[in-house]
Image: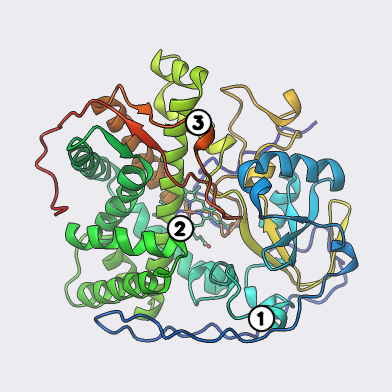
Amino acid sequence: MTQPTSPSEPSGEPGAPDEPGLSGDPGAPTAPEPTAPEPTAPEPTAPEPTAPEPTAPQAAPAIERPASHEDAVELFGPRFQDTPAEVYRELRNTYGPVAPVLLPGGVPAWLVLGYRELLRVTENTKVFGRGSARWKLWPQIPPDWPLRPMVEDNGSLLYREGDDHRRRAGAVGSALEAVDLNQMQDATQSFAQGLIDKLSEGSRADLIADYAHPLPVLALSRVLGLSDAEGVALVKAINDMVDGGPDALRGQIEVRGTMERLVARKRADPGPDATSRMIADRAGLTDQEVVEDLMVLTLAGHQPCTDWIGMTLWLLLTDHDYAADMGGGRRSVRQAMHQVLRDHTPVQIFAGRFTTQDTVLGATRIPAGDLVLLGLAGANTDPYIRPQAGGVAGPEGHNAYMSYSHGEHRCPYAGQWIAEVVAHTAVETLLEHLPDVELAVPADELRWRPSPWLRGLTSLPVTYTPAHSYTGGFGWD
Ligand code: HEM
């Protein structure tokens, strides 16, 4: 058996050139450029965000379910929310590495659970395109479909293809690679200590809302060149956006407004920050492109870090062996956190890729214009890379995992380095200052966010002995 490669290992290689379809029809024409729907040009932002006018949902035709999806499993509902690993295992047993699934609203898609198949999908950009305008179901998707913001082309680098993507991703990658990781670590530590000081005004807190959630946004704000006060304001706006509640749109308007003001400021007065570097990059990005890509950086960077921190703390508080290994010094925080990334990856499914032609993946036929979901959590537990115990690795396991995806659109290497600095510093600082932290509710009362894409706890209530770090804080009030 060939050794599985480890796409999670940063290699610094430039994106591979497009390859001909590995499993597609070799005679098929090259992928056409996507045409519709056009990316919606964001409205210029008013200084004061106003509540959106309520709009009557427009009727949309019922979604047609193809014969291939008659018995497809739903990637939503209490069972998927609480025990997705069981659902992935069952899907693999029933369908193999590629399974027909349904998203909320009965929207059909294909979930790739096989490690090798996921390598193929992410490497073969000719057959598995990123431009979501290729999706043939758009005419049937209701305007208020809750997953629309995660699938619809917003003009950012996420949905670009070929040279256009290389130009945008190159500018983002270079801007992030120049971040001084030592400074980043110091900044994260000082923000973490400020949050712990605030926690120490009492002896009970929610480690998601009060610690894991604000910390990554604050650290990323420094990377982008925002002031600490702007970073603090961004925490609430991003929280509202991620929650998807009534304030979600207002939060999005506010985040965009912050980025627009930041770009205007840095265009006039550049500094040693990622935003100024993106503006100055030889790619010649327009202000609009910089704003869109800053939104991606902030959102793609923030929530997975929050969930990575949250899940590590959850394991420490609920899994005796995990806590004993880390506390007893048998494993470093870094090693223990890599296990979390592999076994409980924060981005469990990523949407996705869109077939440019009829193709066969594994033994499954996938028609052109379909949505293919990257089953990152499923691929991480593929028995091909984890033959022992049916896909469950021992504590050390190995480094083959898909948590940052793979191929041209994978999480930029410098984004991965930043994530590691933020998440490790967050966990280490908390354990140092609140060593007797304990879960305040029975473990089975903890709840997971109802998202098919991201895996994270809604809250993590704890008790502890207050301990001030005496850093003086950074202006929360
Ligand atoms: C634990 C933390 C993180 C995880 C698990 C993660 C995971 C991912 C995944 C799965 C993708 C999609 C790849 C694809 O389409 O194939 C992605 C894309 C991306 N991530 Fe991350 N990410 C993390 C942190 C960060 C951070 C801290 C940043 C920036 C500071 C960042 C920036 C980006 C960007 C810009 C993209 C878009 C890449 C493209 O389409 O070219 N990520 N990330």
| Residue lying at 69% horizontally and 84% vertically, measured from the top left | 60
Task: Report the front residue among 54 and 331.
Answer: 54
**Amino acid type, label 2:** Ala
Q: How crowded is mark 1: few (under 14 residues within 10 Å), some or many (20 or more)?
A: some
**Amino acid type, label 3:** Ala
Disc 3 + disc 1, Cβ < 8 Å: no
- Residue 300's mark? 2
Image location (x, y in percent) of residue 16: 62, 57
Sequence-first tag of 3 and 1: 1
Q: Residues within 10 Å of mark 2 (few under 14, many from 20)?
A: some
Separation of disc 3 and disc 1 at Cα?
47 Å
Left or right of 35 in this view: 20: right
Q: Name the residue under label 3.
A: 443
User: SS class of the residue under badge 1?
Assistant: loop
Sequence-first tag of 2 and 3: 2
Q: Is residue 246 above or below residue 93?
A: below
Q: How many marks?
A: 3
In this view, the mark in front (2 or 1): 2
Image location (x, y in percent) of residue 293: 42, 69
**Amino acid type, label 1:** Pro
